[in-house]
Image: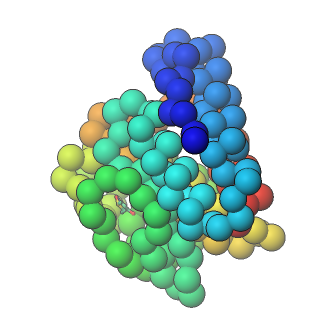
Amino acid sequence: MFQLEPLSSVDNDKNNKTESYQQLLEQVKSLTQSEPNIIANLANISSLLFWQLTDINWAGFYLNEGNQLVLGPFQGKPACIRIPVGKGVCGVAAATGEVQRVANVHHFTGHIACDANTNSEIVLPLKKQGQVKAVLDIDSPVFDRFDEQDQEGLLAIVSYIESLI
Ligand code: SME
């Protein structure tokens, strides 16, 4: 049985934050490496991110199907089911293939408010052979919750998830 060990130091200390993300990546690996089912793995990864990161109100995946993002495994309040590629923060991440790190979602044109408590957001595309197959979306009630280090740590996790899909 997987044990949800607390990360050593989820705080604002820069070195500790890097270390926390390394531990989080190890937890993601140990939770998924012996299971081939992608839905099961994405479900557990969304749970791990939701419970291990601080100040998070939603963490999950949207899967790219045609020209739409369809809601995948997540933790948090019920969310929009289909998002057109190009719309909202998730849709822009899928359309451009680039990470969207938004300090204040209320200033992002076209932001889709699934949970009124969300104030900042990071969306990372998951690619296979250059194509965006899914996005990882993490939302926070705290303004400017995600910094460069969060982006780097999450990119390492996304890169591992890309090897699973
Ligand atoms: N806020 C996102 C929509 C997804 S939910 O937040 C879960 C967006 O603008 O794409």
Please, is residue 31 above or below residue 36 in the view?
above
**Residue under the image location 73 percent in, 54 percent down:** 34
Q: Quadrant of the C terminus?
A: bottom right
**Colour option used:** rainbow
List x then y, in percent, for residue 134: 58, 67
Inspect this view and state whether residue 100 appears.
no
Residue lying furthest left: 116
Residue lying furthest right: 129
Instruction: Give the camera-side residue of 47 and 85.
Output: 47
User: Whereabouts is ligand 1, in terms of quadrant?
Assistant: bottom left
| Corner quadrant of residue 20 | top right
List x then y, in percent, for residue 93: 54, 62
List x then y, in percent, for residue 82: 38, 78
Left or right of 121? Residue 141 is left
Please, is residue 161 above or below residue 142 in the view?
below
Left or right of 139? Residue 5 is right
**Residue under the image location 35 percent in, 75 percent down:** 81
Instruction: Give the camera-side residue of 101 and 159.
Output: 159
Tag count: 0
Please, is residue 85 above or below residue 151 in the view?
below
Left or right of 57? Residue 12 is right
Residue lying furthest bottom: 66
List x then y, in percent, for residue 144: 38, 34
Inspect this view and state whether residue 116 appears.
yes
**Residue under the image location 51 percent in, 33 percent down:** 4
Please, is residue 110 above or below residue 58 in the view?
below
Q: Quadrant of the N terminus?
A: top right
**Residue under the image location 52 percent in, 52 percent down:** 44
